[in-house]
Image (cartoon, rainbow, N blue to C red):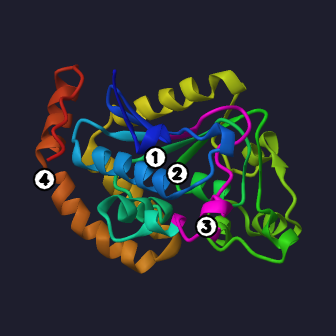
Amino acid sequence: MTTSQDNADQVIVERRGNVQLIRINRPEARNALNGAVIQGIGQGVLEAENDPQLRAIVLIGTGDKAFCAGMDLKEFASGGTGAGLGSSEAGEAYQRLSRGQVSVPVVGAANATAVGGGLELLLSADLIVASSAAKFGFPEVKRGLYAAGGGTDVGTRIPLNIALELLLTGDPITAERAYQVGLVNLIAEPEQVLDAALAVAERIAANGPLGLAASKELARLAVTDHAEARRRQGELQKSVFSSADAKEGAMAFLEKRSPDWQGK
């Protein structure tokens, strides 16, 4: 395992085999998003996308109080947080993450409660492992606002009536109910959330990276733009099925060994 710490230790990025672990490290601020955190997360995403040996990302917060409290309102009020979403590569990578457009599969590890902007960040992940003690919700309407950072898209992940319950009442739901309605994939005891998320990420990382990227892109497109998904299906089938990795996958199966993926 190798470790690098950036942005004054507010984001810690660790390589765990073929998995990139990105940890928001501001427990005293409930892991709220400031410019440094946004840049740090974005940089961790860029590293994963540019390294063919990194085939999955786990995103987690530090501590047992919050996964992420959303935007740091103090820094936002002073105009500082927006700097993290500037024209830098890391800022653009963070924005792609928030739109579900990062090519590497992302596992969200909800070490604690995620509400508002924190839940919006968590929903940028493809799969979610949640602490049994966590709660999830969009309280914005209680303050005369709405979930403007992507929260209103939650109906693409769960039944519409449940999405509207979250958005219109502003009330949180438990981890158990979040699992029942399909908001999270797996529940773990609080101290086991990271291990459970890494185990899921390792299962993903064992698979072919081209197939993973294509599967993620097409599945997300099928929800939002079915016609575009059909068009991209034709393009990706040609490139993925004719790749060296496709040949390697077949040979590894015949030779009863683990494949050696090259990402090409």
Would residue 150 be visible to someone looking at this image?
no
Q: Which residue is mark 1?
A: 106
Residues under labels 3 and 4: Cα distance?
A: 48 Å
Q: Which residue is mark 4?
A: 242
Element marked by disc 2: loop
Element marked by disc 4: loop
Q: Which residue is mark 2?
A: 125
Whole-percent x and y of residue 4? 34, 32
Residues under labels 4 and 2: Cα distance?
A: 29 Å
Q: Earlier in the sequence, mark 4 or mark 2?
A: 2
Q: Is residue 252 above or below residue 54?
A: above
Query: Magenta stretch containing residue 69, yes or no?
Result: yes
Element marked by disc 1: strand
Residue 76 - label: 3
Q: Earlier in the sequence, mark 3 or mark 2?
A: 3
Badge 2 vs badge 1, beta-carbon distance below 8 Å:
yes
Badge 1 vs badge 3, beta-carbon distance below 8 Å:
no
Three-letter amino acid code of the residue under disc 4: Ser
Q: Is residue 26 above or below residue 159?
A: above
Magenta region: 58-81
Q: Residue at x 17, y 62 (%)?
A: 238
Depth order, front residue of 134/83: 83
Three-letter amino acid code of the residue under disc 3: Phe
Q: Earlier in the sequence, mark 4 or mark 1?
A: 1
In the rendered structure, the answer to whether residue 150 lies left or right of residue 35 reads right
Badge 3 vs badge 4, beta-carbon distance below 8 Å:
no
Front: mark 1 or 3: 3
